[in-house]
Image (tube, rainbow, N blue to C red):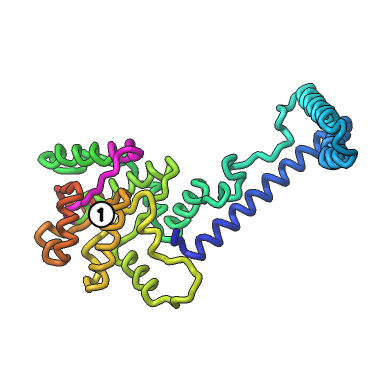
Amino acid sequence: MGYSKKNVNSVYEDFERIRDENKAQAESRLFEVYAKCPEIKAIDKELSRVGLDIFGATMMGKEGLEKRLNELQEKNELLQQRRIELLRDMGYDADYTDIKYNCPLCMDTGYQGAKMCQCLKTALTLKGYESSGILNLLKSQSFESFSIDVYPQECQSIMQKNYKKLHKFAENFETNKEFFLLAGGTGLGKTHLSTSVAKVLIEKGYDVVYEIAQNIFSDFDTDRFRDRYSDSELLSEKYLDCDLLIIDDLGTEIVTNYTVSYLYNIINTRINKKLPIIISTNLSAKEIKAMYHERITSRLFGEFTVIKFEGCDIRKKKISG
């Protein structure tokens, strides 16, 4: 993924701190147990010798090796069982002295083998929201906080349909790989509902990238002018590979041959990979067709489900009371 180095370093530091804290807490519990029950300390000392005992058994030759190894295994199992009994006698669970990982899948390393763990992906996404200010939207904008009542009576029916359609998409994301174009004027709820989708998917552990169009194209420009021999990650990769990409305010950017090319690359690549996109715009269908190449508009109006937002500017309505 093309996460920023600053965010990556920050999240890695967080993971390292979490590992250190969890390890320190486990050691504290272990010393507590040792102080109360010296026998457990003696058992742990015996268990720590298992590797040496196995090595010693193999050095004695092949004759009788299987028997010696079985005896060591039996001894090891008895020691472990005795340790569990002693812990339970003191009112502790069997794993009381074990390290308690925030993520048991990767043991707080962020990786399962060579593969990035979902917990690290989510942390990086949240860090991206935090650094861009979108995290504040996630705190206040959700499906639960979306109100149909703020819309004029004649618009409530269509907005209810829009709400249900995007809510269903979020809830069934595992099997529902749709593409959406949210179109309508400023302040009609496009950002609120797209943020609501992002919130649901982040909570499910999906990698969601939410960015305004001009910032996305700026990242592609940065990659275009980067040192060809640089080993730094491409900023644009995350827009092509994340589970869901949300492009906000399409049409506010300065349209050039490059931005058109970037947009086509994003849309075409993600359609081929069956990776959903939500695009929001204040532009009308006529304006979109006038601004962008036919290759783009044919996909936007052919591959995407167009959701129209109607009503008056909700933000102004809220301010005026």
- Residue 153 is left or right of residue 112, and the answer is left
User: At 33% from the left edge and 48% from the top edge, which residue is drawn?
Assistant: 195
User: At 28% from the left edge and 66% from the top edge, which residue is drawn?
Assistant: 262
Tell me if residue 40 can be seen.
no
- Residue 244 is left or right of residue 234, and the answer is left
Instruction: Name the quadrant of the N terminus.
Output: bottom left
- Residue 283 is left or right of residue 189, and the answer is left
> Which stretch appears magenta?
167-185
Q: Residues within 10 Å of mark 1 (few under 14, many from 20)?
A: many
Please tell me whether residue 163 belongs to the stretch shown in magenta. no
Identity, as a three-letter code, of the amino acid under mark 1? Ile
* Place of residue 144 in the rendered image (x, y in percent of width and height, measured from the top left): 33, 38
Q: Give whichever of 104, 203 is nearer the camera.
A: 104
Residue 64: which quarter of the image? top right
- Residue 94 is left or right of residue 70, and the answer is left
Residue matched to label 1: 279
